[in-house]
Image (spheres, helix red, strand yellow):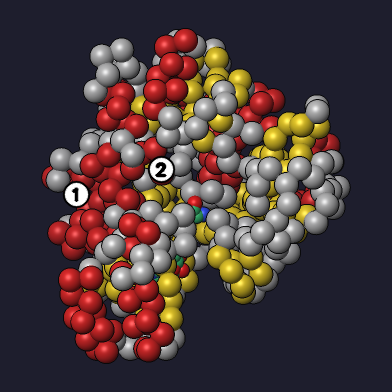
Amino acid sequence: MNILILGAGGREHTLAWKLHQSPKLTKLLVAPGNAGTAEIAKNIPIGVNDFDGIKRVVLEEAVEMVVVGPEDPLVNGVHDFFLNDIELKHIPVIGPEKAAAELEGSKEFAKKFMMRHNIPTAAYQSFTTENLEEGYTFLDSLKPPYVLKADGLAAGKGVLILDNLEEAKEELRTMLVDAKFGNASATVVIEEFLAGIELSVFVLTDGKGYKVLPTAKDYKRIGEGDAGLNTGGMGAISPVPFADQDFMDKIHQRVVIPTVEGLKKDDLPYKGFIFIGLIKVDNDPFVIEYNVRLGDPETEVVIPRIKNDLVDVFQAVANQTLDSIDLQLDERTATAVMLVSGGYPEAYEKGKEITGYDSLDDSLAFHAGTTLKDGKVVTNGGRVMAITSFGNDFKEALKKSYKNIDKLHFDRMNYRKDIGFDL
Ligand code: AMP
Ligand code: GLY
């Protein structure tokens, strides 16, 4: 089978690495990919939102399946683009159709979905410039901290958590009136603050049945002890040690089943990954957000723990026979530590040569922001590479990742040395 992966990060390198192991794979393409995917697949220099370009590649390279990494093309309707094109409609796309991708594309849509299907989540109201005054009144009625969310996609920056009421009101005004996040903040969701520890659950569905994939926890802040600015993710652990059987049963009954059933009831066509961001309050799960894709760097710990042939699994999604797959998981813990460019998540330089990543001992290097320049692998983004290791527990796994990181080098390389500190 010829497969095209859309995307260029650590998530896509991990998917490529896993698909590459399948005897059913004939040709693997990644658009646009990175230096890591170039080692095992053919990179195609087109963007994930260039649907006409994607069509050209699919026809020229006889692609038989498309796996979508990031949310953007899904929210923009890449799956629908295939279904509506006579030459592409028979080619399966792993990733939901546009209507279902709104679960990530609009926070208000996701909130309404959860309310409709009785899925536990924080109480909320949404506001536009039309009812700004009501927004202030709603903030008056809440206790701090105040949670303000831009409704649309804002590259992970659209959520503000503020301690001060006047500041919250000013931010609400800035988001709505000054379009702080452009069109994404034309509607703002204000919700009740939930205090607890976060984790994510990944589900794969074919629109009929589903499989619950491993849990993971990511570390979003740049600084140790979860301090400083938010990033795309500085590390991840799977499984999450505090998600015991009893808690997982609650997640399954209260969140996973109503989500999959809700998609069916609402006629939201979904063949792909659902990333459910949860918070554990006392001993109960609440949904913070849905993403319509895998997480990054969660993928770098979730996918390596799946023992099945991923081509088989994706074919079952395409054919709606996922129920017949017997999902086999590696019981060990996987951890990923993300190496980032000095300065990230603010300004940073690119083009630094990376050395030592190809001689790791018992760890995997998944490339994120890397590219090839004059035959050398150089940095090409803020998040550069994830170092994944297995262990009997997260401490053992992390020890391997950190030991291997000592062999790696690029100018101004930075990483968090405290992944798992809160567990
Ligand atoms: P989101 O983009 O919705 O995942 O929000 C980004 C981050 O903001 C989450 O990972 C949480 O850490 C935090 N967050 C979002 N909603 C809430 C909430 N209702 N209560 C507490 N923290 C929240
Ligand atoms: N690591 C969080 C995300 O992929 O959205």
Location of mark 2 (residue): 72
Say left or right for 348 vs 176.
right
Question: Where 319 sits versus 332, above or below?
Answer: above
Respond yes or no on whether mark 1 lies under 8 Å from ligand 1. no
In this picture, residue 17 sits left or right of residue 245 = right
Where 283 sits versus 142, above or below? above
At which x and y percent is residue 387? 70, 47
Q: In which quarter of the image is the C terminus?
A: bottom right
Please state which of residues 91 and 412 is positioned toward the viewer in this rendering: 412
Question: Is residue 70 something one can see in this rendering?
Answer: yes
Say left or right for 101 vs 329.
Answer: left
Instruction: Indicate yes or no: mark 2 CB to ligand 2 under 8 Å.
Output: no
Q: Is residue 413 above or below residue 73?
A: below
Q: Which residue is drawn at 66% across and 26% down?
A: 38
Q: Which amino acid does label 2 sit on?
A: Asp
User: Mark 1: few, some, or many residues within 10 Å (few <14, many ≥20)?
Assistant: some
**Label 2 CA crowd tier, 10 Å (few <14, some 14–19, many 20+):** many
Looking at marks 1 and 2 on the same chain, the residue that comes earlier in the sequence is marked by 2
Marks 1/2: CA distance? 23 Å
Tell me residue 24's x, y (percent). Answer: 51, 15
Residue at figure coordinates x 23%, y 70% from the top left: 129
Q: In which quarter of the image is ligand 1?
A: bottom left
The residue that appears at 80% across and 27% down in the rendered structure is: 375
Q: Visible in this render: residue 248?
A: no
Q: Which numbered marker is on residue 60?
A: none
Which residue bears the numbered disc 1? 262
Q: Which of 10 and 74 is in front in this view?
A: 74
